Amino acid sequence: MTSSLCPFAAGTHAVGRIHDRLRQDTGVHRDKLPDGSPVWIIGGYEAVTNLLADHRMSAAKSDSTTNFRGQNLPRALDMNLLNIDGEQHRRVRRLATTAFAPEHHAAHKRVVGDAAKRLIGDLPASGELDLMSGLCEPLPPRVIGTLLGLPQDKLDRFQTAARPMFAIDTSEEGYAIQGALGAMLMLVAGAINDKRQSLPKLVREIISDVAPVNYALRRFPLEDIAVNGITIPRGETVILSLRSANTDPARGARPDLAFGRGRHFCIGASLAETEAIEALRHVFRRWPRLRPTKERSDLVLRHSWLAYSLAELSVYAD
């Protein structure tokens, strides 16, 4: 990898070229994370999709043989679904899955719609708007706060408290919501005028094509494994490039990996899509004509190597 195509470059529009490069040769690359710790990076649809579903790949940091620490959170916060595996993961996931069952979809839709309307109502009726700070960023924590049962007068405080957590490179679904919603607003406002295309279909296509999360969270092999002829030793850190997999020409019509695959598939994927659909619906109900104030190449990206997300989304409403 050249320095200009560092796999962990942040805030760059060259993200597509970076992840295309990860598919080259064997698709297995040895590098270092931004903190200097060694890592294996895997690119390409076939390898990534297989490893996501491979039960020999653990998400538990306790299975690291290189003393991987990550964000070094307090134990109570560290023992979450993203950092546990095995029977403990299955037990906790079963409990959490209940909240996202299909019978709750209508209630989730109402909560998202109410939150989007409130946030949009606080923005100017016309002129230049930043929809990233005004809608995309505050919507996920506001929805989560409501689903947790917080009263309306406590949501602003919860949103403020949650902001630093959404700024840390730990939440795949959080960045997927923010990044995809920002990309959708940009694309829909600037280029898409086909009223016949349904929003759910459009949202699914853009989540697949834009790939707002670049990498799945790290995994640790429970035994030595071979990937495309390369042996990765037990317990070493492995990061899978979701972007290189989703944009791989060899993927064809096979499912995208925007929310992962296997036992760690994003538990909030349906809610994330609902947030994007309902937010778009209310945005274009309030402002039927929106246009970006900047060219795509001038858009400022969030400084993150894990996610591909806008730092701001300036549009003009009339």
Image (spheres, rainbow, N blue to C red):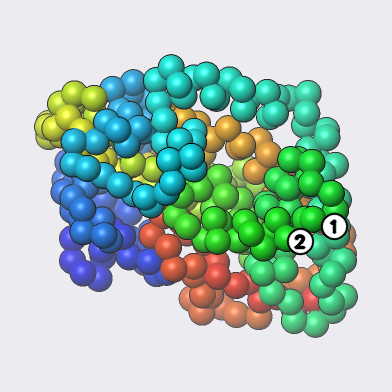
> Do the residues under discs 1 and 2 have CB atoms within 8 angstroms?
yes
Give the residue displayed 79% in from the left and 46% down from the top: 150
Q: Could one spot residue 9 in this view of the protein? A: yes
Is residue 216 positioned above or below 289 on the image? above
Q: Secondary structure at mark 2?
A: helix
Q: Residues within 10 Å of mark 2 (few under 14, many from 20)?
A: some
Q: In the rendered view of the protein, which quadrant contains the C terminus? A: bottom right
Q: Residues within 10 Å of mark 1 (few under 14, many from 20)?
A: few
Residue 153's label in the rendered image is: 1
Q: Could one spot residue 42 in this view of the protein? A: no
**Residue 279 percent location from the top left of the image:** 76, 54
**Apparent side of residue 4 relative to residue 310 in the rendered image (left or right):** left
Q: Nearer the viewer, residue 194 or 202?
A: 202
Residue type marked 1: Asp
For the image, the number of numbered tags is 2
Residue that mark 2 sits on: 156
Q: Secondary structure at mark 1?
A: helix
Q: In the rendered view of the protein, which quadrant contains the N terminus? A: bottom left
Give the residue displayed 74% in from the left and 40% down from the top: 148
**Residue 3 percent location from the top left of the image:** 21, 69
**Residue 123 percent location from the top left of the image:** 82, 72
Is residue 210 positioned above or below 103 on the image? below
**Apparent side of residue 44 relative to residue 281 in the rendered image (left or right):** left
Is residue 76 positioned above or below 212 on the image? above
Tell me which corner region of the image, top left, top right, bottom left or bottom right, holds residue 165. bottom right
Give the residue displayed 25% in from the left and 71% down from the top: 4
Residue type marked 2: Asp
Q: Nearer the viewer, residue 177 or 46?
A: 177
